[in-house]
Amino acid sequence: MSHEPRPRTVAGCTLLVIALGAVASACGSNDDPLSSRPYDATDQISFNTSGGDGKKTDPDKPLEVTAEDDDRITDVTAVDGTGRWVAGELAADGTRWHSTEPLAANAHYTVRVSTEDDDGAPGRRVLTFDTGKPTAKKRLAVEFGPDAGEYGVGQPVTAKLDQPIKDPAQRAVVERALKVDSTPSVQGGWHWVDDKELHYRPKDYWPAHATVRVHSNLDGIKISDRLWGGPAKELKLTIGDRVIAVTDASSHSMTVFKNNEEINQIPVTTGKPGFETRNGVKVVLGKEYFVRMRGTTVGIAEGSSDSYDLPVYYATRVTWSGEYVHAAPWSVGSQGYANVSHGCTGMSTSNAEWFFDNVRQGDVVQVVNSDGNTMETFGNGFGDWNLDWKKWTKGSALTGGKQKTEQDTSRLRPAAV
């Protein structure tokens, strides 16, 4: 499992400190102030914390570090007992550093400050402090999905909140704390579906046989004056082979690829006029050996020419509204030649059994060249992949359509009818 790199407060200053340290080591002891060991900067650095007097620091307040006299702050790191780093900003003149994200409640922090004086000599100070209990009564619970297990390359990760988060700044606090690490690494991001749900997906599909770990750093973090983050159960997913089934509604054929190699081509029938199958990328939601399909469940009046009530076998679901890939022995004569279904993708019983046995939840089913609408992005299954990457990132509270920062990207690296 990868470890999240700590935020760099001022990369330029940090590199300068490292470079100066190298010079001091090479030159040895002489009159150059940079050749001496870092001095104790206790008298030159102050914090707005209790500082070990027995009182706990208010987690509602940002952490501030201030340089006294002529010293200048060059680098600050603050990390709690669980390994969470605190992001912050350093003033251009090096006189002040302050945190830019909330501190956790009931946490133990270690802060390391690097300084330099007028002569460029380095100084160091280390401080530890504890934060108190949150004053808010409400805690935000997060539930990750799907259940732990093995999935296809198209499976998004979901995060469901037990309370709505509408404010953009509060959304940023929540999103920043929700971590997804994959091995091998991928570029990916969260998208707010609504006030209580986020989806995470890579820019492209997950790599075959990847390991995906999801966890929250939100516990004890202040979100608003009356709301703090609560605990969340970690999630581990494994990704199987890259299985993608492409149905061409115009040629009445499904081509199934496994790890980029064609493994089967199946004659099919899709939705007839008025019941056209949805175009676009869908994700397998589940498999049901037997389903009783009735036209009345999708608004077809009983007794009409389009009414049906059929036992259906080997049904692979791709939408919550009832679109399946399934056995349709009654339409074998049309499969490969015409579209006669009410929106599902029908095939022979033997082909449906093969498909049923060779796909898993999270595998990709893509329909092209249908006269139907494009699969809904959200709410009727997983149409997440029908948003291009630019539009997907616009749903993030952190990027809002902008390119991810190096820090945001680095946290992704390992460890129908």
Image (cartoon, helix red, strand yellow):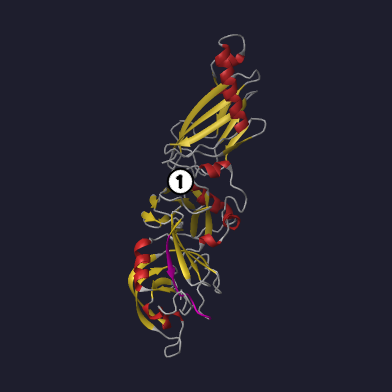
| Amino acid at pointer 1 | Asp
The quadrant in which the N terminus is found is top left
What residue did someone put label 1 on?
181
> Which secondary structure, mark 1?
strand
Of 392 and 64, nearer the camera is 392
Q: Is residue 274 left or right of residue 325?
A: right
Of 66 and 273, nearer the camera is 273
Q: Is residue 103 left or right of residue 15?
A: left
Q: Residue at x 38, y 79 (%)?
A: 293
Of 41 and 359, nearer the camera is 359
Please provide percent x and percent y for residue 341: 45, 79
Q: Do we see residue 316 in this rendering?
A: yes
Residue lying furthest top: 30
Residue lying furthest bottom: 303
Q: Do we see residue 194 in this rendering?
A: no
Relative to residue 187, is residue 57 depicted above or below? above
Q: Residues within 10 Å of mark 1 (few under 14, many from 20)?
A: many
- Determine if the magenta segment contains residue 272: yes
Q: Which residues are magenta?
A: 263-273
Number of marks in the rendered image: 1
Residue lying furthest left: 289
Please provide percent x and percent y for residue 57: 48, 38
Relative to residue 188, is residue 268 depicted above or below? below
Q: Residue at x 40, y 58 (%)?
A: 146
Which image quarter: residue 317? bottom left
Please provide percent x and percent y for residue 403: 61, 48
- Determine if the magenta segment contains residue 275: no
Residue lying furthest right: 93
Please provide percent x and percent y for residue 325: 41, 70
Relative to residue 143, is residue 12 depicted above or below? above
